[in-house]
């Protein structure tokens, strides 16, 4: 039996909702069949199917281990009832069945061909000279090529939308650019369907009416409204996305075709429009929102710092709801408000953590006092008829107080992971640290985990020397292995908690840690070894 090409799902009750697909575009079955070197031949079932995964199984009933969308490869070792077997695959949502002939079966059983034709499951004949692993590699290669095309397209769209958002008329400019990228109509509607701004070719009246009705579904005029909805009307693909801010604004899209990456491009526009269309923003709030947008789109810290109005210290927080439910923009905004910030990123997609950027606390008085004089005494005194000027707030000088970092606290219903306070130039590293802190908090069931800055004995080693030592020591490890080792050590060598934190099976953790020990030629049960590795991992 060939080894599985994708990890199995855990055995258990059948899923009642379709699982989330992999972060790659689906591959049309026709593209796989076009690879002549594989020698595949469709002998039953429909010609159209989209492949999300490849899986090999010789079980009599692989239903519990399928996610849906698989090309299932089998040699029919335990095939006894083809009709029941195909029925179970269809129930599990398998995309197609690849049946390998020889050595078990000389030809594809006629009963299996009839069952696939009757139940609408594409059946491929796999010749003896084509290993199942070769088919899996071909599918992954096609997926990688499709993903690369999609990423290039999304990146170009992202840059174009960011440029449009910097124009004097940002909302119409973003809508125009979005309509150009998607090749259709983009409109900003109120909860009642009134068109505020629009760009692109207008759809026919019936499709326009259907789009307005779809927009009302997501307008959030009542609790429980979805954040997005899609529909099709007469060959026109319709989409509606609720904007953040609680004002009932909706981004409505009408396109003639729907391509891979369209939803991601639309999501970028939703974030931009939510910030740009937020009502009653002062100059300071607008600048901070613009800083968040630019950070989301990869601007350098030097560009962001002036808009944030402070070099820090800043704390990056990653958050997930404790009940596992996804957080919409309103829920994430409420979390940000409770933490005292409006810089919240909740639009990264389903299953992703909410990101919050928490700035410094109230800025202290930076007026320097002379010896024996308090800060209050150092303020200029107003003469009769004059007002006391507000002191300027330059960068803190030696001997002056700097802003205290804001301290995150647990929030009911949320699991939080926070970085240590960091300057604006190190936000990217702090973002990765916050992600690890959240994984640690979830694994230990703690409401909040805050990463501690390097201190104690480790702080006595010059940073450059520490980093060089860490690079040399950890050089044999790949990034996934290093991340697993870091997580495992932070959780005191707990296999189960590390598996929860990384979202993998505990046996996978054991295999990775065993591999780390082999590559490093170290005994990971030795406390001295663990201490040295932990020191090195803290430098990366």
Image: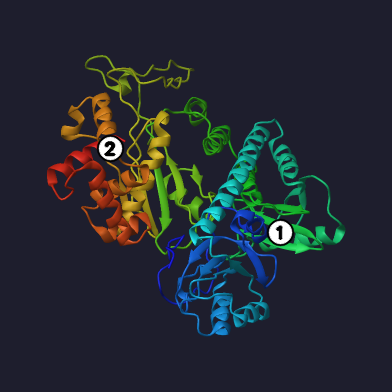
- Element carrying mark 1: helix
Q: Residue at x 46, y 43 (%)?
A: 341
State the mark number for residue 474. 2
Q: Residue at x 61, y 57 (%)?
A: 26
**How is colour applied across the structure in the image?**
rainbow
Where residue 460 appears, as percent x and y from the top left, is 17, 28
Where residue 185 appears, as percent x and y from the top left, is 78, 49
From this view, report whether residue 412 is shown above or below residue 155.
Answer: below
Where residue 279 appears, as percent x and y from the top left, is 63, 44
Q: Quadrant of residue 128?
A: bottom right
Q: CA distance from mark 2 to mark 1?
A: 52 Å
Where residue 9 appears, as percent x and y from the top left, is 43, 67
Say which quadrant the C terminus sits in.
top left
In the picture provided, is 277 more to the left or to the right than 341?
right
The single residue placed furthest to the right in the displayed view is 205
Q: Quadrant of residue 519?
A: top left
The front one of 464 and 410 is 464
- Element carrying mark 2: helix
Which of the two marks, 2 or 1, is nearer to us in this view? 2
Q: Earlier in the sequence, mark 2 or mark 1?
A: 1
Q: Residue at x 30, y 61 (%)?
A: 507
User: Dot 2: within a 10 Å radius of its alpha carbon, few (fewer than 14), some, or many (20 or more) residues?
Assistant: some
User: Dot 1: within a 10 Å radius of its alpha carbon, few (fewer than 14), some, or many (20 or more) residues?
Assistant: many
Say which quadrant the N terminus sits in.
bottom left
From this view, report whether residue 299 is shown above or below residue 433.
Answer: above
State the mark number for residue 215. 1
The front one of 470 and 171 is 470
In the picture provided, is 489 more to the left or to the right than 292?
left
State the mark number for residue 401. none
């Amino acid at each position: 039996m060939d080894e599985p090409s994708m990890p199995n799902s855990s055995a258990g009750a059948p899923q009642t909702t379709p699982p989330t697909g992999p972060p790659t575009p689906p591959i049309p079955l026709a593209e796989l069949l076009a690879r002549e070197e594989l020698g595949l031949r469709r002998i039953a079932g429909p010609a159209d199917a989209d492949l999300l995964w490849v899986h090999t199984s010789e079980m009599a009933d692989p239903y519990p281990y399928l996610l849906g969308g698989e090309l299932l490869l089998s040699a029919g070792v335990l095939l006894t009832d083809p009709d029941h077997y195909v029925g179970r695959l269809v129930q599990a949502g398998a995309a197609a069945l690849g049946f390998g002939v020889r050595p078990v079966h000389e030809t594809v059983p006629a009963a299996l061909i009839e069952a696939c034709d009757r139940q609408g499951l594409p059946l491929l004949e796999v010749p003896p000279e084509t290993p199942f692993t070769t088919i899996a590699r071909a599918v992954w290669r096609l997926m990688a090529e499709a993903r690369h095309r999609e990423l290039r397209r999304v990146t170009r769209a992202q840059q174009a939308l960011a440029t449009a958002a910097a124009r004097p008329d940002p909302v119409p400019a973003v809508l125009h650019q979005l309509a150009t990228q998607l090749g259709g109509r983009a409109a900003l509607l109120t909860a009642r369907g009134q068109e505020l701004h629009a760009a692109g070719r207008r759809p026919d009246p019936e499709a326009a009416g259907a789009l307005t009705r779809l927009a009302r579904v997501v307008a959030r005029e009542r609790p429980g409204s979805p954040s997005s909805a899609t529909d099709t009307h007469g060959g026109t693909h319709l989409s509606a996305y609720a904007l953040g801010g609680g004002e009932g604004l909706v981004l409505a899209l009408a396109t003639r075709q729907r391509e891979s990456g369209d939803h991601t491009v639309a999501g970028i526009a939703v974030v931009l429009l939510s910030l740009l269309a937020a009502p009653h923003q002062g100059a300071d709030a607008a600048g901070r929102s613009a800083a968040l947008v630019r950070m989301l789109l990869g601007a350098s810290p030097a560009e962001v710092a002036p808009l944030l109005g402070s070099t820090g210290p800043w704390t990056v927080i990653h958050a997930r709801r404790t009940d596992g439910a996804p957080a919409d923009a309103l829920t994430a905004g409420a979390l940000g408000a409770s933490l005292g910030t409006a810089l919240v990123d909740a639009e990264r997609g389903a299953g992703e953590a909410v990101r919050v950027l928490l700035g410094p606390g109230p800025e202290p008085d930076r007026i320097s006092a002379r010896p024996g004089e308090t800060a209050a005494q150092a303020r200029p005194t107003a003469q009769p008829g004059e007002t006391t000027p507000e002191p300027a707030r330059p960068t803190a000088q030696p001997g002056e107080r700097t802003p205290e970092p804001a301290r995150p606290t647990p929030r009911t219903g949320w699991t939080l992971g926070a970085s240590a306070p960091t300057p604006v130039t190190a936000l990217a590293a702090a973002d990765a640290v916050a992600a690890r802190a959240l994984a640690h908090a979830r694994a230990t069931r703690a409401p909040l985990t805050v990463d501690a800055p390097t201190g104690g004995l480790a702080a006595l080693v010059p940073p450059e020397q520490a980093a060089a030592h860490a690079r040399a020591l950890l050089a044999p490890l790949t990034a996934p292995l290093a991340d697993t080792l870091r997580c495992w050590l932070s959780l005191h060598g707990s296999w189960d908690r590390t598996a929860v934190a990384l979202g993998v099976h505990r046996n996978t953790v054991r295999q990775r840690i065993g591999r780390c020990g082999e590559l490093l030629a170290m005994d990971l049960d030795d406390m001295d070894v663990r201490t040295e590795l932990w020191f090195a991992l803290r430098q990366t």
